[in-house]
Amino acid sequence: MKTRRFLHLADLHIGKKLGDYPLLSDQEKVLAQACQVAKDCEAVLIAGDVYDKPNPSAEAMKVFDDFLTKLCQMGKQVYLISGNHDSAGRISYLGRILESSRITVSAPFTGVLQAACKPEDEIQIWLMPFLTPNRVRECYPQEKINSYEDAVRIVLAHSRLNPEKINLLMAHQFITGGQTSEEEFAVGGLDNISADLFREFDYVALGHLHMPQAVGGRKTVRYAGSPLKYSLSEEHQKKSFTVIEIQDKQQIEIYQIPVDLPHDVRTVKGSFRQLSEMEFTQDYVHVTLTDENPVPDARMRLRSIFPHMCGFRLENAKLRKDAAVIPEQTPRQQSPAEMFRLFYLHQNNNHEPSEEQMQIVRNIFTQLEREEL
């Protein structure tokens, strides 16, 4: 058999925002890079979460349409399943018509794996869109299905594979042991699935986790990861495109091609002065300010250096512990200026206000008392 090459993608999340910033432009750029990688591949596997929402915007749909159109113009076969962020019905819409353009999408779930290739083909590709226990119970009401693992086990048990063929599975699930970022999972770990369920498959093209990684102790059970950093928890991840090279059942090689990120996602931390001295950047930045005394309009002033500030927080001693104000006198016995002083102490980690500040406060209260008279 000649060497066969496939590009494995997942978790495109087209239409996602990072903070208040739309990422469509960045997504267009990384998908253009994916097209360049696909030039040396015969097919592209997209393992779910095409869109970030079940009802994607027209702009998001256009970005994906342009991507598919480019792949079709290049003569590439495309296989596509829906993920937990997608609407399975919308992904499968016009699926039979798309097959004439060499695009095979996961059809409405019927209880078994969807075969995407002819029985005589050397490589068999199987499609399994994101499954939930409820979805599988509808097809097998007589079965005891209490977890995601139960659901997938039942589906695989009713799907007949030819072990003489090279079997590739596309799935969008959480495999036990996978390293997570901010993806959502079922409460109590009910969405965990053992990689042992996929032992009959020669390669499993996974989607759902955003970090590129092999799971279950097999290099061929693999998450492609998302092509962009979609949260601060992904700050230190190395994004890549996954290329699978198949010679036979025993010779399957995995290559990771780095993604050239249009903008990075990172954290900066320091005092206002330290942050003000940093270089201007278009990266998506989460800022942590460490000044003990708040700097007026710090957030707005720092935007001149970090225009894509997607998060801002204060971190100092007074925020790390509860400060209690125990006045020696009751409020009625305290002067307004003294009440201000105690409030200032509470807000500024027990630092006394300066004499100049106190004099300004005394003058204000004196003026107010005169006006009341």
Image (spheres, grey):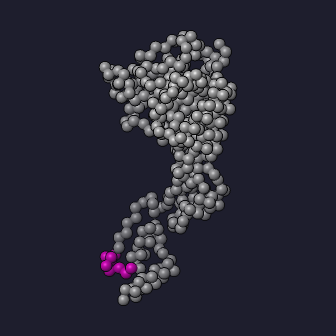
Residue nearest the observer in this picture, 113 or 318: 113
Does 363 sit left or right of 42 as displayed? left
For the point 64% across and 23% down, which residue is it?
A: 42
Q: What is the x, y in percent for residue 304?
A: 62, 60
| Quadrant (top left, top right, bottom left, bottom right) of the N terminus | top right
| Position above or below: 57 against 77 | below
For the point 44% across and 39% down, which residue is it?
A: 184
Residue nearest the observer in this picture, 122 or 179: 122
Q: Does the magenta stretch include residue 10?
A: no
Does 158 sit left or right of 210 as displayed? left
Q: What is the x, y in percent for residue 287?
A: 55, 55
For the point 45% across and 60% down, which residue is it?
A: 319
Give the total of numbered labels: 0
For the point 60% across and 40% down, which residue is it?
A: 27
| Quadrant (top left, top right, bottom left, bottom right) of the C terminus | bottom left
From where the camera sits, is residue 359 visible? yes
| Position above or below: 304 against 146 | below
Q: What is the x, y in percent for residue 216?
A: 50, 26
Tell me the quarter of the picture where residue 345 sits.
bottom left
Q: What is the x, y in percent for residue 117?
A: 55, 17
From where the camera sits, is residue 240 visible? no
Does 92 sit left or right of 7 as displayed? left
Q: Does the magenta stretch include residue 330?
A: yes
Which region is colored magenta? 328-336
